Image: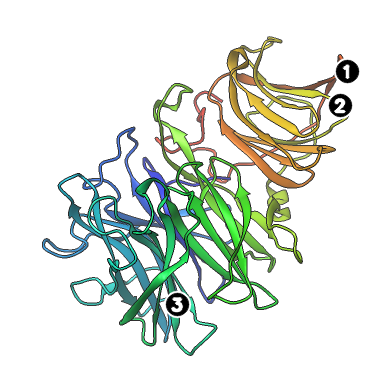
Amino acid sequence: MRYAPPGLCVNDFALLRDDDGTYSVLHLQGPWTAEFDHLRMETSYGRATSADLVDWRPEGTAFGNGLPGRFDQQAVWTMHPVRHADGMAMFYTGVSGLTPGGWPLQSVGLAYSDRTDGTGWRRHGTGPIVEADARWYRTGERMGWRDPFVVRDDGSDGWVMVVCAADASLPVEVSGCVAWATSDDLEHWTVHPPLISPGDVDELECPVLERLDDGSWLLLGSIGATRGFEAWTAPRLRGPWTRRGPLGPTGSYAPRVIAAPDGSRVVLHTTPRRVGLTDSGERCRGMLAQPKSLVVQDDSAPHLEWWPGLDTWLGEETEQPGPHAVGDVTVSGRVEITLRTDAPGSDRPALVVGCDGKNLWITGPDGSRLGETVLTEPASVLRLLTVGEYVEVYADGVFVLTTLCYSGHPAPWTAVSEGRPRTIPVRPVRLPAPGRDDASAVWPGPASS
């Protein structure tokens, strides 16, 4: 249900689909570490393929740093490939080095391929194709010019690129914005003032543009401070853009949108892990989470729901304990659902999901809060997913909360409401690669499960 290449972590990624229906993911990859080293980590893209967006097969490295002296000599970051002629054009972030203050110097480059499967890339020249314009964007210290995303322009015959940037007119702490540029040929770009500059965001990363069925646009942006992502909508690319609020809860990041095998529109995103696979470990780059259905209806705020395509990975209902499971709980008044206990056969909770109307929370050992949110409306049904340490909660079908918990042992799920306990039947989750035994295997791994 999740993916990382053997022994490594996943960060930002891009999705593409070949003519035969095969999906490819290109992703930043790096070692497990609490300290992020801008010059030694994420120096290549991994690639994996899938037929269903769930079962991913590692295919090795597909792209890496440029030669010494070039704009991408130190690191290559977030990318976006688009169909071009009979192959693809890939826009990507290059890091040339660090400023005196230790900030990465970023710009956007271009590579081409004659293939459509995410391989065979050749660089276009030795320099970037578009850089931050100091008239509108911060350059040098605390700059941002990364995470390009390119779509066809709806106001001309050309192209539009959006980029994560820092608004030079705002204090650095709230300067996160989405820059944009236009081009007629993909190689020569004109930079414009910010497309979106909220004024209360530190970093607005990994912008994604999706044209909706009615011709309007959806923009998704990851928010550095909250480690979640938000949505904006507009009738045209040039706006006006309306902020629609969070689309994914804290812990879900760097979303991408793609058509699933059933034709529906889904979102995939990353989820973090902890160094050492313990609750006390520092958060680090993580894994690719399973798809969620993207729902955009009329004037309602966009949201994510459980994707029915996952149901083929679920077993028959049981009351037996298991480390990977999905269960539905009807909510009537305050309810607390124990998913794991501190020892086999114990009744002392190690992982609990609680709800008392609009308030929703997850606690770990000794009742420590691992995550919480306030719902817009009281929940009537909760859907809970656990895959190893990873926990997701859906309230009346909507994805609202996620966290990590490395403590405890599988136990029958038990809900307590109004002082009365009841056992919750669950559907076991079948893992695509249950025998994996490396640093990126799902906790607790084959030897301990």
**Residue type pointed to by label 2:** Gly
- Real-space CA distance between mark 3 and mark 2, rounded to the nearest whole angstrom: 50 Å
> Residue 178's image quarter?
bottom left
Q: Is residue 285 visible?
A: yes
Secondary structure at badge 1 equals: loop
Residue behind mark 1: 418
- Real-space CA distance between mark 3 and mark 1, rounded to the nearest whole angstrom: 56 Å
Image point 65% across, 65% down: which residue? 261
Q: Give the camera-side residue of 247 and 78.
A: 247
Q: Name the N-terminal-most of marks 2 and 1.
A: 2
Secondary structure at badge 2 equals: loop
Coloring scheme of the render?
A: rainbow
Q: Name the N-terminal-most of marks 3 and 2.
A: 3
Viewer-nearest of discs 3 and 1: 3
Q: Position of residue 47 (x, y in %)?
A: 40, 58
Q: Give the camera-side residue of 142 and 113.
A: 142
- Asked whether the beta carbons under mark 3 and mark 2 sit within 8 Å of each other, the answer is no
Residue behind mark 3: 160
Horizontally, is 122 left or right of 317 in the view? left
Image point 47% across, 49% down: which residue? 201
Placement of 218 over or under 394, stated as above or below: below
Residue behind mark 2: 333
